[in-house]
């Protein structure tokens, strides 16, 4: 695979083939996504844009329940496990109501990679 990084960030990833962070408009990002095979991202505008142009995307979810955010069959949600969906209570105080953040700590690169390979 050729890796292209899109979006906005203060710290772009290293070791990507094409780093277009902070360099594309929404229209340019849509054109790139349209020609891509797969997007791997967090629940963000890019994931919705990929869906809009008909591309599959693997979306990483933490405390947000994918059932309330996934809009089509193009999105493959990846979650850590049982601990999910505390976001409505979490967003106000920026702390995990269960005190552990397992939704993020137990989410592994291997799980995201497996979803990406299966979806590509």
Image (cartoon, rainbow, N blue to C red):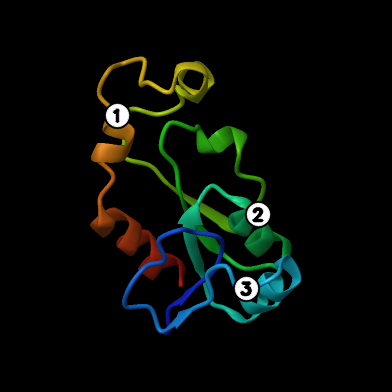
> Sequence-wise, which precedes: disc 2 or disc 3?
3
Q: Which mark is residue 33?
A: 3
Density class for disc 1 (Cα within 10 Å; few <14, some 14-19, many ≥20) is some
Question: Is residue 73 in view from this perspective?
Answer: no
Residue 43 place in picture, x, y as percent? 53, 47
Residue found at the very far right of the displayed protein: 27
Gap between marks 2 and 1 measured at Cα: 25 Å
Q: Quadrant of the N terminus?
A: bottom left
- Image side of residue 26 versus residue 16, left or right: right
Along the line of sight, which residue is nearer the eye, 81 or 6?
6
Q: Quadrant of residue 13?
A: bottom left
Density class for disc 2 (Cα within 10 Å; few <14, some 14-19, many ≥20) is many
Residue 45 place in picture, x, y as percent? 64, 53
Residue at 65% across, 54% down: 48
Residue at 33% across, 73% down: 14
> Sequence-wise, which precedes: disc 3 or disc 1?
3
Where 112 sits versus 65, above or below?
Answer: below
Residue 114 place in picture, x, y as percent? 31, 62
- Image side of residue 80 versus residue 24, left or right: left
Q: Which mark is residue 101?
A: 1
Density class for disc 3 (Cα within 10 Å; few <14, some 14-19, many ≥20) is many
Q: Which mark is residue 48?
A: 2
Along the line of sight, which residue is nearer the eye, 19 or 115?
19
Where 93 sits versus 6, above or below?
Answer: above
């Amino acid at each position: 695979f050729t890796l292209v990084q899109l979006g906005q960030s203060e710290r772009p990833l290293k070791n990507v083939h094409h780093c277009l962070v902070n360099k594309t408009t929404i229209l340019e990002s849509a054109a790139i996504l349209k020609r891509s095979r797969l997007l791997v991202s967090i629940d963000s505008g890019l994931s919705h844009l990929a869906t809009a142009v008909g591309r599959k995307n693997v979306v990483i979810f933490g405390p947000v329940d994918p059932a309330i955010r996934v809009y089509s069959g193009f999105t493959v949600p990846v979650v850590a496990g049982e601990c999910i969906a505390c976001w409505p209570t979490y967003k106000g105080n920026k702390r995990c109501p269960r005190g552990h953040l397992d939704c993020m700590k137990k989410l592994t690169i291997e799980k995201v990679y497996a979803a990406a390979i299966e979806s590509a």
